[in-house]
Image (cartoon, rainbow, N blue to C red):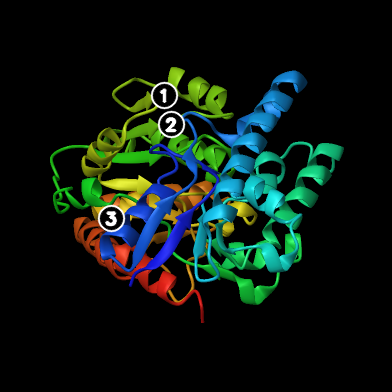
Amino acid sequence: MKAELIVAGLRASGEGYPNAEQTIRLLGERGDYAIRDLGRALPADLHLWKLSRLPPHRLLLALARLGLGNLLSLVRVLRAATPDSRVYVPYPSVFFLWLLSWLPAARRPYCIADAYISVWDSMFRDRARGGDSAASRWIKRIEGRALRSAARVLVDTEANRACLIEDFGLDPNRVRSLPLAIDAAAFRAAAAYRSQPDRALTVLFVGTLIPLHGVPTILQALQCLLDSPSQRDRFRFRFLGDGQLGPLLNEFVQRHEPERVAWVREWQPLDAVAREIAAADICLGVFGGAGKAARVLPFKLYMYLASGRAVVSQAQLSVPSGAPAPPLEAVPVDDPEALAERLVALADDPQRRLAAAAAGAGYFERWLGAEALLRAWDALDT
């Protein structure tokens, strides 16, 4: 008889938040669990970090809706769960778990909570605003209480695991790091990388324009190359995404010819992102320094590696438990000159690009793909 896995709470959805949907799909397809969905997907365009920008009355209304939806899900879960049930609470699990935390421990079902992005970290520390405000302290207390009520807390990397334990006082035995789940089919479909020496190399950045991604470092490196008569014609730079540093990128784009620097600001569907990566020679990762940028392995790196493309990113990063460092072209933190030099080195050496691309695809399959995720889930009770 299959074990029962109940899905609970209001969960993030859409192509920007694939983890829950793809985790549920993979566990269901393998057939070990009878999955019962007693939660609900949130609108795809809802991003929690944006809540802090709302006027007070709209913020209270949004929080009330999240609270009520999670309360209804909790009531349904408590009615349905048995002592043998496992309850998966996808991101943002904090709302469901906070309600659960008020029940006696003996009444709580065994909850596996997805906390791969801390709500407090995303709303305050990640965006470098109001980190010591009353709202920040309030959200941090709520999130800590919520996460401590879960039997297992899931994060994406070992560094994030250590940070979550320290930030919220969690039991280390309850916190596990495992790969994120993405729909890799579109990225695996990318043709194997081939060098085309008679054209400029396409250097691609995909992602939200936030401090974590190190946009100023990237732009300084690109400016070095565009200012160099011997290098400027060797590259085409493309950006996909928008965010709080959009004005900075906009000013940069306006100063350069469209054939040298292009920016696709509008949100792109997953298949369009996959085509952009497939058309790129080199993909840019994160360059945001020693803070959160050094603790993550973001979705876009999963996409780049699954597509088999050479990736340049900062040397400081983290990975899921048991995984080795990925085969990236690593550069020092906050070093635009080193980034520019690495792009030139890759432009000079087609075989190096080919080797990096092949190594990336192999790494994804072994350490970040579906089988790696399922192995991690199998080990959750150990």
Mark 1 or mark 2, which has the lower sequence index?
2
Position of the N terminus by quadrant: bottom left
Left/right placement of residue 343 relative to residue 116 reads left
Left/right placement of residue 65 relative to residue 284 reads right
Q: Between residues 346 and 205, which one lies in front from this camera angle?
A: 205
| Residue found at x 13% / y 40% | 198
| Residue found at x 76% / y 54% | 102
Q: Which residue position holds label 3?
A: 306
Coordinates of residue 19 in the picture (x, y in percent): 42, 51
Q: Between residues 156 and 221, which one lies in front from this camera angle?
A: 156
- The circle on residue 265 is 1
Check if mark 3's residue and mark 1's residue have beta carbons within 8 Å. no
Amino acid at circle 3:
Ala
Q: Which residue position holds label 2?
A: 241
Mark 3 or mark 2, which has the lower sequence index?
2
Amino acid at circle 2:
Gly
Give the class, few, some or many, for how many residues have Cα within 10 Å of label 3's Cα (few <14, many ≥20): many
Check if mark 1's residue and mark 2's residue have beta carbons within 8 Å. yes
